[in-house]
Amino acid sequence: SMVPKLALFAAKDILPEEELSYDYSGRFLNLTGSEDKERLDNGKLKKPCYCGTKLCTAFLPFDSSLYCPMKNPNIN
């Protein structure tokens, strides 16, 4: 199909050589509350972000249900 499965749109004009970033949290314009700066999110640890940009929310979205621990890892 010629219809894209994913599309990104800019809320403002993008200048040449301007740095672009993507906020995986899904918040528009990276609006955050003080609770987003906490290390815990509903009792779960959040994955810290080390990008260092001034608008960073300091944590990446992390869903531990996407990962299953290996009971018997095969180490060679």
Image (cartoon, grey):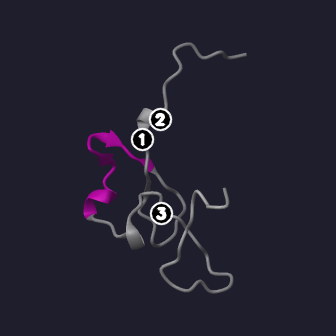
Count residues near mark 3 (Cα–Cα under 10 Å), then give few for <14, some for 14-19, many for 20+. few
Give me the C-alpha separation between circle 3 and circle 1.
15 Å
Residue 12 % position (x, y): 50, 84
| Callout 1: SS | loop
The residue at 27%/40% (across/down) is 43
Residue 61 % position (x, y): 43, 50
Q: Are marks 2 and 1 in contact (CB under 8 Å)?
A: yes
Residue sitting farthest toward the top? 72
Residue 50 % position (x, y): 52, 57
Quickly name the residue at label 1. Answer: 63
Residue 30 found in image quarter:
bottom left
Magenta residue span: 34-47
Sequence-wise first label, 3 or 2: 3
The residue type indicated by label 1 comes to: Asp
Indicate whether 57 appears above or below 39: below
Quickly name the residue at label 3. Answer: 23
Quickly name the residue at label 2. Answer: 66
Give me the C-alpha separation between circle 2 and circle 1.
6 Å
